[in-house]
Amino acid sequence: MTRRILSQGEQFPWRVAMTRTALSDTPGEPSPVPSGTVTSGNTPDLRDYDVILANSSAGKDSQATLDEIVRRARELGVLDRVRVVHADLGQVEWPDTIDLAKKQADYYGVPFISVARPQGDLLAHIEDRAVKQILKVQESKKAAAEAAARGEPIPEIHKAAPAFPDAKARYCTSDHKTGQVRKVMTDLARQLHESGQVTGRPVRFLNTLGIRAEESPARAKRIPYTHDERASNGQRHVDQWYPIHDWSTADVWNRIRESGAPHHWAYDKGMTRLSCAFCPLASHGDLLTSARLNPELAQKYVDLEHRIRDMGVPYRFTQAHSMEEILEEAKALGPLRDDERVPSGGCPGGGCDNFPEGEQPDDDVETDGPRHNPISLGIPSIPIHRAAAILSEARRMLTDRRRVYR
């Protein structure tokens, strides 16, 4: 599916307001990115920014964040600078997610942008990552054997990174969300500069996220309003803001009810989180509920586990549970009735390990690097030519998404 951001030559409908923090005004020469936030203090002045991005997963925290942004922007007369951006995760998202994200944007009269990783969805990414890790392990074993035969120091054997995302390798977020939203920023900054609406300085972005302190100790330590140096460059200055950082879950739902905007039906079935239907960081109760509601997608994850296992690597959905085990447990419970809601975040009768939404590390994580010892994972040794053949065959399969995943 082709994702449209802005067509060539299309102009933005707003005029860039004068801001209180002066940068370079030299025409055609954007100034260096300043080290601090555009607005001084602990809270941004929305009038100081050319573009206000509201990241939306269509989940409850994104929805409450959007409502808060819209309220403040209306009061300050800068609603026309707000854009909702949704990172489309494809088939791994809950059904109706992208449509709901757009409905929520339309509800507030805010333009909607959808963007997706062009190399393929998360299931394809996981499989490609697995075969690459196998090849690296076998190549490093071959190099070690050759060094030993020559009597040279033996190099370290490559330690395979996990195929599925986990708390230490959350490439699902960095590659499929954060990285794609930055491409949107690049396109918007280019359009504003080319149209002449911003000249002589970087475009000022306020990137907003629905992150709350109550979600986890790590998120509680975050500073709600900061400069995002990694996302900034000579063409754009990016500050990051968590408008509902100090809100409770009750605050979030009270605001959603007050707003009247639609929320996702998965919450009505007992889910505590949204976005990916199956997140390795979700509680076991949420995974069971999702499997009962999305058995066909769960089976695709099971099939993926089997393909990775057939390559010679016993990778599982999580270290605690394989998706095959989760699906079997869900089948034993049976599908959820239309009028049924599972209590305690998806755990029948309560008692499951229900983590708060967002019990996870920072979004911008490294996507590569050693994580686990291949010996401890039980990875068998296979000839390097076989690993290369596996990689070649996997790449051939990945070019035909329809046959492999649909």
Image: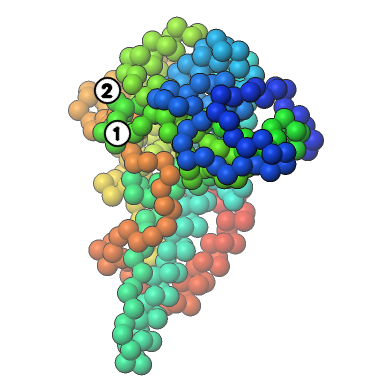
Front label number (2 vs 1): 1
Q: Counting residues from the N terminus, which is met first, the one under dot 2 or under dot 1?
A: 1
In this view, the residue in front, 115 or 226, is 226
Q: Is residue 275 visible?
A: no
In terms of secondary structure, where does tag 2 sit?
Answer: helix
Residue placed at 45% from the left, 27% from the top?
40
Question: Which residue occupies the extreme bottom position in the image?
Answer: 150
**Res 74 quadrant in image:** top right
Q: Which residue is mark 2?
A: 344
Separation of residues labelled 2 and 1 (CA atoms): 27 Å
Q: How is the image coloured?
A: rainbow
Q: Position of residue 347 (x, y in %)?
A: 27, 27
In this view, the residue in front, 249 or 93, is 249
**Res 48 quadrant in image:** top right
In terms of secondary structure, where does tag 1 sit?
Answer: loop
Residue placed at 26% from the left, 30% from the top?
354
Q: Which residue is mark 1?
A: 221
The 10 Å Cα crowd at callout 1, few under 14, some 14 to 19, many 20 or more, is few
Quadrant in which the C terminus is drawn: top right
Compared to residue 171, the image places residue 107 above or below, namely: above
Compared to residue 392, the image places residue 343 above or below, namely: above
Q: Position of residue 341 (x, y in %)?
A: 35, 18
284 relative to 83 in the view: left or right: left
Question: Which residue occupies the extreme right position in the image?
Answer: 9
Q: Which mark is residue 202?
A: none
Asked whether the residues under the numbered discs 2 and 1 touch, taking CB atoms below 8 Å apart as contact, a structural biologist would say no
Q: Is residue 267 visible?
A: yes
